[in-house]
Image: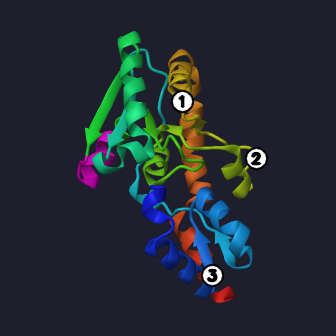
Amino acid sequence: YKCEWLGNQFQDANIEIAETCNGIISCLYEYYKAYEPYYKDKLAYIPLPINTDLLSYKQKEIKEDKIKFFIGIQKLKSKLKGTDLFLEEIMKTQAAYPKELLVNKVTSLPCKQYVKIMSESDVILDQLYSYTPGMNGLIGMAQGLVLVGGGEPEMYELLNENNNRPIISVFSSKEDISNKIEMLIENKKSIPEISSNSRRFVEQHHNYIQVAQQYVDFWNSK
């Protein structure tokens, strides 16, 4: 990926746009940190927008039966998002805990069908290498799923969120993925509270009306 984007016309175009624009909006912590050393005076962080009115919330309950783990596979982005490692470890864990765990695995489905199957799960695995949840993870959280994926302290700090930190953050290692999945299986009682906190987190920081207003305010400031 570095070869595709560095030292060529893509890098040149990116720099030209950054140099000549009036303002830069970053929607992820990673993007913010990439631009910050060079363009801090014209940079703003505005979170991704989620329309929670279109996503029904159902608090996940403590289950006597299997916990349903959801993993969505985009064939062209599997390695980029770390889905390949997530899938490998969740299947190993399912073999070790056959009575405790069920895997809902989907590949390249239409959006509506994808979101429906996601909503019927309890936990979503997404964005292994990220410090920040992406749209996939946020849609899951809005529906009450527990997110295992990108959610580092630096991201929360950028949001000024010190209390509600519901994402089960993982390091990019097979061992840590396995440990975090097993932790959820062995601590089922924590799932309802994390589920509730996940929805609240999206409502507070990613409300689409609030985000749109931040865009307008930033535009007017320039």
Q: Secondary structure at mark 1?
A: loop
Looking at marks 3 and 2 on the same chain, the residue that comes earlier in the sequence is marked by 3
Q: Which residue is mark 2?
A: 162
Of the residues tagged 3 and 1, which is closer to the observer? 1
Residue 23 falls within the magenta-colored stretch: no
Q: Residue at x 55, y 25 (%)?
A: 180
Amino acid bearing label 2? Asn
Compute the Cα span from label 2 to label 1.
26 Å
The quadrant of the picture occupied by the N terminus is bottom left
- Magenta portion: prevailing SS class: helix
Q: Which residue is mark 3?
A: 23
Q: Position of residue 30 (x, y in %)?
A: 60, 57
- State the residue in front, 108 or 196: 108
Residue drawn at x 48%, y 60% is 50
Q: Nearer the viewer, residue 22 or 159?
A: 22
Q: Position of residue 110 (x, y in %)?
A: 23, 53
Q: How far is mark 3 from mark 2, CA to CA?
A: 28 Å
